[in-house]
Amino acid sequence: MKIKINDSMKNMYRSLLIVLMLLTSFVVNAQEQPGLRDRANQLYKDYEYANAASIYLRLADVKKPKLTDLERLADCFRKMNDYEAAENWYARVIQYPESKADNLLAYGAILKANARYDKAKQMLQQYAAKTGDKKRVLNEIIGCDSALIWLAKPTAHKLKNEEQVNTTLSEFGVFPMGDKVYYTGEPNAAILKNTYGRTGNPYLRIYTAERRERLALGAGTLDNSVYNDDRYHSGPVIGNKRWNQLFVTRTYVGKDGEVSKEDRQKYRTNNLELVIYTLNNGIWESRAFAYNDVQRYSVGHAALSPDEKILYFVSDMPGGSGGTDIWFSELQSDGSWGAPQNAGTSVNSDGNEMFPNVAVDGTMYYSSNGLPGMGELDIFTVKGTKNHWSKPVNLRYPVNSAGDDFAFAGNSEDEISGYLSSNRQGGKGGDDIYSFTNLKPKLIFALKGTTLNKKTGEVLPATAVSLFGNGRRIVARQDSKEDGTFFFDLEANTNYKVLGQKLKFFSDSATVSTKGLVKSDTLVATLRLQPLLEVGQVFVLENIHYDFDKDKIRPDATEILDELVRIMRDNPTLEIELGSHTDSRGLDSYNLDLSQRRAKSAVNYLVSRGISRNRMTARGYGETMLLNKCSDGVKCSSAEHQQNRRTEFKVVKN
């Protein structure tokens, strides 16, 4: 029997088929998404943050992403030290009504890491209001207030990244000795095969480097002495003046290498010990510090008083004020070290104190995260001895930064130059070694500027003005005054970028340079910020270039797009159309398709940096909106054609 199928039945079957396809798609997606999430979560648990982030990005690029996915994604970027991306994602995390109070703490910490202290303070205050726990964030809030003052008026210290010794891994803890220095670093895996758990990097080792003119360090050399024992993390190291006795901090990492890089500065409890090496007839003989007890607590980070009769060190042994404290032992008549004594509450806080160093005049420098500061670890100085010390003084910016700053080692001759270690942004690797000087410059340079409303020409007060040197290294930051003016001190032989940012305005920047200047001078810059208030307003994103016939975002374009990311992040109600334009060369239809793909690539980049896709529309205009005469058949120069190849964004909603 044959059944005749009429048009009505065909339409019914067609509709049923579509419904079945949609249901199948829904079921498949419902199965795939948890599968992706499970995979991402496992990678996250395995500390494979980059791989986990790539999957969380896919899970986040939906209309209603799950809060837990965004939290994990933000944390991945934090642990990858991509603080810009972490800030963008935490900005979305805290918008969820069900977001936990701890996310405000995490967001505040990231904002501090990006030197956005005013915004960080707001998040910390919100945490205190939400939880009632003001005590937990009091130091952080005070640190934010202080950091804003210190960034606006930096000290005279000039820092230089010692690129000859620094690598993409970590180097830290310089101890000067004659014409060379000793420091601690992570060897390249090709040098040492033994690696430790979470970073996959080799165990810490002690290196030496030559000291050259003006504190510059030559390339590092792995020290092959006996104290570089391959069963341990070795370093930091210090020595006495005769250099016949060394105090080496070492860490037994266990058979699985449990110590992680993120714990490296704290050295997990039960891991740290101090070993004393004495040179006897050309042979280094070792003995353990008498008060090591690796089963109960850690001991390390040694420092000697100028007369070498007091040994300072760091420990979390019972009887301290907080996490790790600074302790001391006195040299006995028989050459042994006396029972440890705590350096007291003037130095120690309820946080972690570490990396002490004592100058020739008895001044102690050390790092702490338990006192108000700019970052996680800040460098402080105190005067005194044993357990009698003055009030700690923060060494301010630029000695301290939004990152971890530690292992301050002054030059024994003058104490106005030396070395410190930091993981601040703009470095070469994880922790880097910096030399510093604190000398009055021979030539004096300054930058005087004004912030204006580009549309009205009126002064624009309270504009956040940031000064960057030699790339994205922040030099100083301040708000323009009531008359719109700002003022910065500059260094010789340096290229600078000055950036002005304000809520509801499109940022503006200018470049200045002191290179080639042979006389003291004051340079001038005017920043004109365009209001973002008008719907339909169009902004050209300068220097967004694509390779010929390509739609991929080039590395040189990401810096410009990153500024748009910041504008979108800081103006959360802003919605835009991102448009791409071509010149007239080529077929109209091809140019239209190419520009659409380019606009979509730009939107995709902003999505990858934390901006919700539903706030943006990609549109390719091809050659339909030329800015000059260069239409089909008109002879034009390359520069004239380039004028038409542009990327713009238009305000759709504000």
Image (cartoon, grey):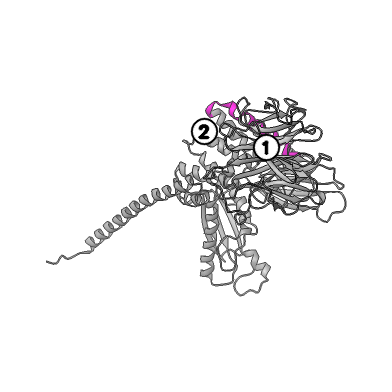
Does residue 583 lie above or below 105 as drawn?
below
In the rendered image, the quadrant that contains the C terminus is top right
User: Image quarter for residue 630?
Assistant: bottom right
Does residue 31 lie above or below 352 as drawn?
below
User: Is 87 positioned to the left or the right of 401 in the image?
Assistant: left
Per the image, is 223 magenta?
Answer: no
User: Is 481 positioned to the left or the right of 590 in the image?
Assistant: right
Q: Main secondary structure of the magenta part?
A: helix
| Crowding at mark 1 (Cα within 10 Å: few <14, some 14-19, many 20+) | many
User: Image quarter for residue 357?
Assistant: top right
Q: Position of residue 198 (x, y in %)?
A: 54, 46
Q: At numbered mark 2, what does the secondary structure look like: helix, strand or loop?
A: helix
Q: Nearer the viewer, residue 70 or 536?
A: 70
Q: Position of residue 641 (x, y in %)?
A: 64, 68
Q: Earlier in the sequence, mark 1 or mark 2?
A: 2
| Amino acid, disc 1 | His
Q: Residue furthest front?
A: 281
Q: CA distance from mark 1 to mark 2?
A: 35 Å
In the rendered image, the quadrant that contains the N terminus is bottom left
| Crowding at mark 2 (Cα within 10 Å: few <14, some 14-19, many 20+) | some
Does residue 406 lie above or below 524 as drawn?
above
Q: Badge 2 is on which residue?
A: 101
Asked whether residue 561 appears in the rendered view, the answer is yes
Q: Residue furthest left?
A: 1
Q: Badge 1 is on which residue?
A: 301
The stretch of residues the image draws in magenta is 130-153
Q: At numbered mark 1, what does the secondary structure look like: helix, strand or loop?
A: strand
